[in-house]
Image (tube, rainbow, N blue to C red):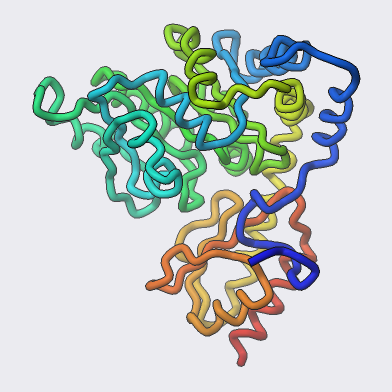
């Protein structure tokens, strides 16, 4: 299904949104004259400095092209040939990256069923029985998503508890931060509180879902790992030749809290949508709204009527659950018009 004048604002994904004007301006400012390729430019140096300013002097940031690539580079830093990753069964690396971890990294995913997309320390320890057994893969990394695929968020204390459980068993903690900004906005904390200060080893910082254009970062907090990133980034096809255009976007997001303003607005629009559903009969929330995702359960006929006009996806078609995403450019009017159409569809 293509978006054209037939369709109003998309609620299918924050990837459907355009690019924030401030980020376009940053890219335009970088588009003057020549500059060395592959990151040997002043814009990339400025981005790397922004990473240290945001996450601490021990943080090393590396610009990459997309979220799945950021996950593969970050995870590859910590894995050997017979290792495994412990993650929730709903994790993006387990459900929506086409088996990239298994195919490209050659590792096993040890998934854990969760009711809210979030791992607990006991979930880690439950997967450690085979450590030292040469007949079994060796769990080496715990990977979580922040926010999760169900739109829920880990508190700083929850992440710290996972980091402690992982480190006590000799594992490292990875965070898929495609929507890290949305989580920090919901938690009303800074980005460092849910990464550096919580004991995370490696994480991705997502820009594309927060107003950027093909701009993500791998951030390494374990100093023993950073030296390998340039080689793995190149080998993983994530090294951009004209990197100044990626680095300038990420710097713009990290300047004057643009990341927070974009994420906070997207979150607020999700809350507006969820609140508006409260008085619509036959429609209920499947999960708490803690980021820019609204998971709603509704009659199939209503969903199909709405899908004739709006773009969005089923999350669990058998249960009648759909996912509606908001973005930095979703307006109150977009949400209110959508709610009006939901009411009309229910009334039919």
Q: Is residue 60 left or right of residue 212?
A: left
Query: Which residue is painted at 65% across and 65% down in the image?
Result: 273
Position above or below: 311 against 38: below
Residue positioned most to the bottom? 348
Q: Position of residue 249 (x, y in %)?
A: 75, 29
Of residues 261 and 74, the one nearer the viewer is: 74
Q: Is residue 94 above or below residue 64?
A: below
Report the number of numbered marks: 0
Q: Quick check: 12 above or below 69?
A: below
Query: Residue 269 location, x and y as percent?
Result: 69, 57
Q: Is residue 273 left or right of residue 112?
A: right
* Residue 165 locus on image (x, y percent): 29, 26
Place of residue 225 in the rendered image (x, y in percent of width and height, measured from the top left): 44, 11
- Direction from residue 54 to residue 288 in the image, left or right: left
Which residue is nearer to you in this view: 155 or 130?
A: 130
Quadrant of the frame with the C terminus: bottom right
Front position in the image: 181 or 164 = 181
Relative to the observer, which residue lies in front, 214 or 53?
A: 214
In the picture, the quarter occupied by the N terminus is bottom right
Q: Residue at x 76, y 26 (%)?
A: 245
Could you say which quadrant of the image residue 317 lies in? bottom left
Toward which corner of the image does residue 59 lie, by quadrant? top right
Q: Residue at x 69, y 45 (%)?
A: 264
Q: Residue at x 26, y 34 (%)?
A: 124
């Amino acid at each position: 299904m293509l978006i054209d004048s037939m369709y109003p604002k998309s609620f299918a994904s924050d990837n459907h949104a355009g690019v924030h004007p401030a980020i376009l301006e940053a890219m335009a400012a970088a588009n003057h004259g020549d500059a060395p390729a592959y990151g040997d430019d002043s814009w990339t140096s400025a981005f790397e400095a922004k990473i240290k300013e945001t996450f601490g002097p021990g943080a090393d940031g590396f610009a990459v092209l997309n979220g799945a690539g950021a996950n593969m580079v970050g995870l590859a830093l910590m894995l050997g040939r017979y290792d495994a990753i412990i993650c929730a069964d709903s994790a993006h690396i387990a459900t929506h990256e086409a088996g990239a971890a298994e195919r490209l990294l050659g590792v096993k995913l040890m998934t854990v069923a969760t009711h809210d997309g979030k791992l607990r320390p006991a979930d880690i320890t439950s997967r450690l029985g085979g450590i030292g057994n040469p007949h079994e893969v060796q769990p080496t990394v715990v990977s979580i998503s922040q926010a999760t695929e169900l739109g829920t968020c880990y508190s700083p204390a929850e992440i710290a508890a996972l980091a402690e459980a992982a480190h006590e068993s000799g594992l490292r903690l990875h965070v898929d931060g495609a929507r890290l900004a949305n989580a920090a906005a919901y938690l009303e904390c800074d980005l460092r509180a849910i990464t550096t200060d919580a004991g995370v080893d490696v994480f991705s910082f997502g820009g594309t879902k927060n107003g950027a254009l093909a701009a993500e970062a791998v951030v390494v907090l374990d100093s023993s790992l950073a030296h390998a990133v340039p080689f793995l980034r190149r080998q993983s096809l994530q090294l951009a030749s004209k990197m100044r255009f990626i680095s300038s976007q990420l710097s713009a997001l990290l300047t004057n809290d643009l990341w927070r303003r974009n994420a906070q607005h997207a979150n607020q629009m999700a809350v507006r949508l969820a609140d508006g559903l409260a008085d619509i009969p036959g429609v209920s929330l499947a999960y708490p709204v803690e980021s820019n995702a609204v998971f709603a359960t509704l009659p199939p006929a209503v969903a199909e009527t709405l899908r004739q006009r709006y773009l969005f996806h089923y999350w669990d078609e058998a249960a009648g659950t759909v996912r509606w995403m908001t973005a930095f450019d979703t307006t109150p009017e977009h949400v209110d018009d959508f709610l009006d159409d939901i009411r009309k569809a229910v009334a039919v």
